[in-house]
Each structure stands twice: as structure tokens, then as C-alpha cells.
Image: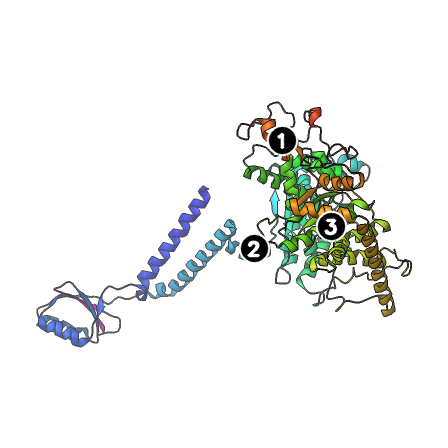
Amino acid sequence: MRRYLIRNIIFYAVIIVFFIIMYRVMPGMRRDTEETVNNAKYMAILEQGDIKDATITQSSDVPTGTLTFTTVEGRQFTIYVSDVRVTEEQLAAHNVNYVVSAVQKQSPIFMMILPIIIVGVVFFIFALIMSRGTAGGGSTGQMMNFSKSRARMSLPEDSKVRFADVAGMDEEKQELEEIVDFLKGPEKYIRLGARIPKGVLLVGPPGTGKTLIAKAVAGEAGVPFFSISGSDFVEMYVGVGASRVRDLFSEAKKHHPCIIFIDEIDAVARQRGTGMGGGHDEREQTLNQLLVEMDGFGVNEGIIVLAATNRVDILDPAIRRPGRFDRTVGVGLPDVTGREAILKVHSRQKPLSEDVDLKAIAQTTAGFSGADLENLMNEAAIGAAIAGQKFITQKNIRDAFLKVSVGKEKKSRVISDKEKRITAYHEAGHAILFHVLPDMDPVYTISIVPTGIGAAGYTMPQPENDGMFRTKGMMMQQIIVGLGGRVAEELIFEDITSGASQDIKQVTAIARAMVTQYGMSDKVGLVAYGDNSDEVFIGRDWGHTRNYSEETASMIDEEVTRIINECHQQAMDIIKAHREVLDEVARLLLEKERLNRAEFEAVFRHIQFGEPYAESYLPEDEQPGYYERRYGSREEKQEPEDEPGKEEPSDGRDEEPADEEPVRNNPEDEDLPEVNPSDSLTDDFRDE
């Protein structure tokens, strides 16, 4: 701090001295206060006797000079005279006191040195400004460090993320823990002739925690950590990116052993030869330098490169080979156990109610990434804060599920009765097929309230497990479910609407994938058509190419149409067989606007077996008076004092009383409503 203060004082002192010199030696820079007059005005003032005193300054060009005089009123005037002797006679004739100064002569040596001094001072000030900008990291520093690496170095004590903060990635952590162990104790590996991997490529969908696990590696390894984005290498000028790569590895060599993390490496490591400009563009030059630094003639002992991408298909093959990236770690979506562990991590700092079941939430969030789960718990916390609660309840999490899945419901939107009726039958058609078809997930929620994404309503299924494969029968049933809304419109209104447009797009995509990708058509056979994975670059192919003939294309279209028509007929038959259920579900939707799983399934039991409707199918914490019965009043309710789940929500909590046992895990008990308050997933078939 003191050093910067001294530098600032020197900087401003040099500037002040410079301007003083310029003022003294260059009269043109002075701000003269005298007024300039012509000869006529000067003579008039002189004749009137208004001159109080005067000063004659002789110039080097004899006999010229300058006359400066002051009037009795105190004003100063200046006039340039051609002959100072004539001026002296005029002043003497009018009894004016005057002073004559000697001729000012500049030293020739000084006049020769002065330009050098001025240039030197200007250069010194410029260099000082540049150094100040470089130290401050401002725009000036960026200009001077144009070719320098923009990587941020973190020391071991700066990183606070550990493997304990990364949940749901046990196998991925195990692979990276080996690298951390190598950095901490390389002797046992070297004794067996093993070498440390030079690079690890983290591959996976967005939001799965690739950057987070890289931070954890830095925190666990206890070595310097350089982090940079792939886009930081690429600039408009060719050669800058390559220079930054060289500077990055040069800095890393000074701090080895260390870790370099390149996020979104696909921004700089795309396949070469795919651009329109040949092999001389900036990205390819940067990639070439990166390849050389990672495994060239130079030796980079003790430098490990971690890189993350969700577009591994477009990376250059040269950078993925062993010797550069020895390991490729797939970071996929978490399974049910991983989701539960992730929810525990994101619930550590959140006060949870004792009715929150993280395991149940994990079971019903198939397809959610770690970022999705974090966002879910954050939305639940926001909802609880808005409601003035002191802790997060299961209802807050259910509402957050709906919000992140289908968007905020727009209950204020004005919809005509006719449109409400069309939407009710449309969603009832989807729900019936979800319930009847054996391979489909059960219904979680049906709603005819418009959402923020533009849907007039939605039918949300409740996934019960994480499936790895989809059978032909399952995909056929997905098409049948997708056509349920259109079939209900045809059956009830004998007309169709545009509300099924998104459904038609989805079922067409499924049917075409069955024919062209999965070999599920006997007529087309076990041939993959339309593999366009190599056509992501405009430089490789000018237009979309098709690797099959027109006859084959016609056959594919016929098969897609046949599959959709068969599924359409099956959907029509099923809904006709459950016409009473369709009418009753639509009636309840018009009455309540939303039905949960228990209410929907009660309609089937009522029509098929004559069971009466229960008084309330609302979840317990949504029933009137729930908080008053459990906590006294909303204002007086306090968090349970000795609840083990408060500090670590992931640990076990006190078991609920028998009379409050959740019924959602008892789907076979028909005397109790089946409710899973934490169920939610993205709606597979949302309506426009």
C-alpha cells in the first residue's frame, strides 16, 4: 500500500513539474491577463494622460519590442511596437514613468536540450500511466497485456470446495481422487512405473456439476489452480490465442505441480478444417498451440489439465487422444440415490419442516440435474419466505416443482367457458391414457390453468423410476398418450383445435426416431437413416445432405404415418371405452381447475366400482387448519427444538406418528388417498 502511495506522489509531482516547465519556456502556453490594443487606441489613452506606468520589453529582433502599460483605472494593456526608442520618446513627452527591460536571450545549449527533456518527460508519464493500468487491471492494463493469459490462479488456501460438497457423483469423484492422491504422494505410483494423467476431460449435460467437481479437485489437491474459459483464448487477431496458451503454460511451469482447468473447451478445441477460412483462423492456431503444449517436444511435468464440455462430439480427435487427455470422465444426470444426496447438500443451510421427505422428492425428480435440484430448493425457500414461514414445508416444495416444471400459473388470465371446456376434455384425454396404459407413469397433476409458457393446461406424470431404455411398446404408448388430447376433441366436439400442435410435433419425432434410428419398423429394417452428426459445421457441407434415396424417404414417411394412425385409432378405442370417466374428469376440472393423483384415480374407482368420493383428497398439509392443529398458529409456530434433521437435513428425522403416516407410499391402500406431495416432472405433453 505504501509503495503505491509513493508511486502516486511521484506521478503527480512529475506532471506538475512538466507543466511548470512548459509554462516558463513556452510563452504561447501562458494565459495572459493583459488586453491587446491597436496603435490608435494606445495613442488616444496616451494623449488623455490615463497611463499610470509602463514597461517596455525589448525582443531579440532589435528595435522591436512589447509595451505593457497600466491605466489609472487599473486595467492592463499590451501593444507590440516596431521601435522601442520612439515609444520611449512618446512616454517621456507625456511624463509617464516607464521601465525598459534588457533583451532576453536563451542559451543555445538549453534550446537544444529542451526538446529532448520534453520528449523524455512525456515518455516517462506515458510509461507510468501504462504501468499503473497494468497493476490495476484496467483497460490500459488489458491493452498492455493483450497477449498474456487471462487465467486466474487460486492458491490452496483460497479454495473452500471439497469432495464432501459434491454429491451424486461417487464414481466420478473416485477417478479424480486418484489424481489428487498422486499429487499428494506420487512415490508409490512412481515406484511401479506409473505416470500421472496429463489431462482429464469432463463430459456431460449442462448443470451436472462439471465445474463444481473441478473446484473440489483444486480444494483437495492442495496445489495452485489455474482456471480459464475456452472463450478467453479466442480474439479477433490471429496469434493472440496461441500466445495466451504459451503464457498460461509458462506460468503453470513456475508453480508446478499445479492444475489447469479450462471450462467450455469446445470454444477453442473444435475440429480443424471445418471453417470457411482454411487452417489460418485464430481458433485453429490456438488449438495447435494447445496440442503442442499438452504433448509436444516440451516437458510439462506436474501440470494436469482439467477441461469441461457438453459438446464432446465436436472436439478435435487430436486433443482427445491419450497423452493429452488420458481420461474422459462422464458426468451424467444423477440417479435416485444421487439426487437424494444432492438434495441433502442443498438443504444444509435451509430450515426444513419435519414433514419434508427428501427421499420422496428424489424419487419423483427423474431427469433433474444437480443445478435443477438446487434451483428447486431455492424456489421452495423463496416461496416459504414470501408466505412468512419460519421453515420450508412439503407444500412449498410441491409448489416449486410445478413452478420450475411448467411455469407460474396465470390464474388472472380471462378464458371463455368454451375454451375451458375444450382444455378440460383435452387434458382428461391425456390423463386417461396415462392411467390405462401399463408402461406409462401415473398421473400426478391435471390442470386447466394457463401457465407462463403459453400452455392452456397441462397433464403432469409422476415417474416412479429412472429408466435406461425405452422399448418399442413403451414408445408406442407414448405416441398414444400424446394423441389423447386430439382424440378427446374429435370425440366430444367433432372438431379439432390448434391446441394439439405441440403434441403432434412430439409424437411425430418419436415415430420418426423409431423408424430411422432404432430399427423398429419391419418394412424399413435395421438400418439407420439420416445420421447427420458430421454436419454440424457449415464448412464441411454447404447444405443438408440425405444418405438415402427418394424411394426410401417415401417409405419412411409411409411408416411414420402408419405408426401414428395406428396409435391414433388405439387412443380413440381406449377413450371411447372410458367415456364416462372422460366426462367426469372434465366436469371436475371445470369445477376445481386442478386435480391431483388421488382425486383423478378416485374417479376411476367411483365409475368402475361405485366407490363414493372421499370428503377431501387434499394432502394433509393443504387441508384447512393444518398449521393450527400442528403448530398452534402461524404466528406462534416454532421450529422443533431437538429435531436432528435441523442441522443436517440429510440425516434421519424423528419418525412421524402413526396417525400421520404419509399415504403416498401405499398405492394399494384404497381407503386412503394416494398423494405424493413431492411428485413432479416436466410435462411430456404440454399444450400450446
Residue pushed farthest top? Answer: 642
Q: Is residue 387 above or below residue 320?
A: above
Whether residue 311 can be seen here: yes
User: Along the horizontal axis of the image, is 110 left or right of 504?
Assistant: left
Q: Are marks 2 and 3 in contact (CB under 8 Å)?
A: no
The answer to which of 374 and 404 lies nearer the viewer is: 404
Q: CA distance from mark 2 to mark 3?
A: 51 Å
Kind of element beneath mark 3? loop
- Residue extent of the magenta highlight: 53-74
- Amino acid type of the residue tagged 2 in the rendering: Asn
| Quarter where residue 386 is shown | top right
Q: Is residue 643 left or right of residue 440?
A: left
* Disc 1 to disc 2, C-alpha distance: 54 Å
Which numbered disc covers residue 353? Answer: 1
> Quick one: SS at disc 2?
loop
- Secondary structure, mark 1, is loop
The structure residue drawn at horizontal position 16% and vertical position 77%, both measured from the top left corner, is: 40
Earlier in the chain: of badge 1 and badge 2, it is: 2
156 or 425, which is in the foreground?
425
Image point 9% across, 72% down: which residue?
A: 48
Mark 3 belongs to which amino acid? Asp
Check disc 3 and report the residue beneath it: 684
Q: Are marks 1 and 2 in contact (CB under 8 Å)?
A: no
Q: Residue sitting at 63 percent across and 45 percent down?
A: 403
Q: Nearer the viewer, residue 445 or 462?
A: 445
Residue tagged 2: 145
